[in-house]
Image (cartoon, rainbow, N blue to C red):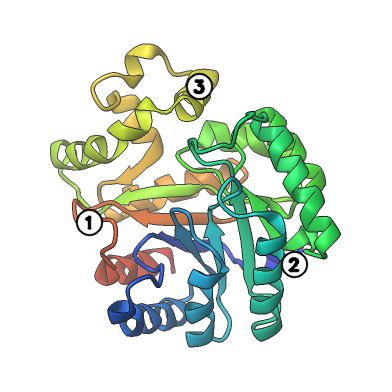
Amino acid sequence: MNPTKQSVGRYGIWSIGLRAEDPARRSEQAETAAELEQLGYGALWLGSNSTARHAAPLLAATGRIAVGTSIQNIWQYEAPVSAAAFAQVDAAHPGRFVLGLGVGHGGAPKPFRGPVSALAAYLDALDAAGVPADRRVVAAIGPRALRLVRERAAGTVPYLVTPDYTAAARETLGEGPLLAPELKVVPESDPARARTLARAFLAPYLTLPNYTSNFLRHGFTEDDLRGGGSDRLVDSVFAWGTEDAIRDRINAFLDAGADHVALQVVDGNPRETLPRETWRRLATLLG
């Protein structure tokens, strides 16, 4: 069995605010992690360019929940450094840290190596350093990256995807690998307000070719990418509305083949905020 797939459960939290950068916030972050574990979430995914260093305080504050990076940028951390950090954290908290890797949106050294080739070389180096394949995940979106995941990692943590994408990714991956898409949740039932919040959040991503190309591969058009995203696009990549509507949107990803859904709250507050009350409500509606 895939140990990472087993350890993360069905639902997790994706958050930039849980990254332990500011010493003044570490107590709040540790307390929040402990509460999220008590609420029944299976994993905490640390957003932005996170590392084992960010995960360690949360692992120390909890006893069961998995903590993963989503993602660590391979251009900014050499594989031997990542492997050493993995070994240190895993020794302190066996089986609970998941090394999530990706190529990000730039910053590649020159001469530039294609992203899939670079990921493969990075995984080669992790193999040589003893990092188990079943304890690392990759933020794969395109078909070639997914095929690499199928052979070389525990699974994938794709960002900004739809249920249709999830179904296609499951077909490419097969049944074994973890498929854990991130899903943005807008805790707002008014359609105009919910879509306004969603578009404000989504607009910067619609300038990034890796995301726009993926949308176009999966049935959207150039018109869907304009103006912060069409209603059709917004409604596919965000969960919003009543509790039943939010639950149905989360279930749409699971029904499409996801093993786990990483929930990111989008409520108009800074991304470093810890929306604890919304996380509590989500835990209740998910049972």
Q: CA distance from mark 3 to mark 1?
A: 27 Å
On the image, which quarter does residue 25 sit in?
Answer: bottom left
Tag shown at residue 3: 2
Residue type, label 1: Pro
Tag shown at residue 270: 1
Query: Residue extending furthest top?
Result: 222
Point out residue 206 in the picture as x, y percentages from the top left corner: 36, 27
Q: Residue at x 54, y 60 (%)?
A: 69
How packed mark 2 is, by other alpha carbons closer than 10 Å (few <14, some 14-19, many 20 or more), is: few
Give the structural element (helix, strand or loop) at label 1: loop
Residue closer to the observer: 195 or 15:
15
Closer to the chain start, of discs 2 and 3, is 2
Q: Where 23 sits versus 174, above or below? A: below
Point out residue 58 in the picture as x, y percentages from the top left corner: 48, 78
Q: CA distance from mark 2 to mark 1?
A: 34 Å
Q: Mark 3 = which residue? A: 213
For residue 133, side relative to residue 75 (left or right): right
Point out residue 128 in the picture as x, y percentages from the top left corner: 85, 58
Q: Residue at x 25, y 47 (%)?
A: 241
Marks 2, 3: nearer the viewer: 3
Residue type, label 3: Ser
Q: Residue at x 71, y 64 (%)?
A: 83
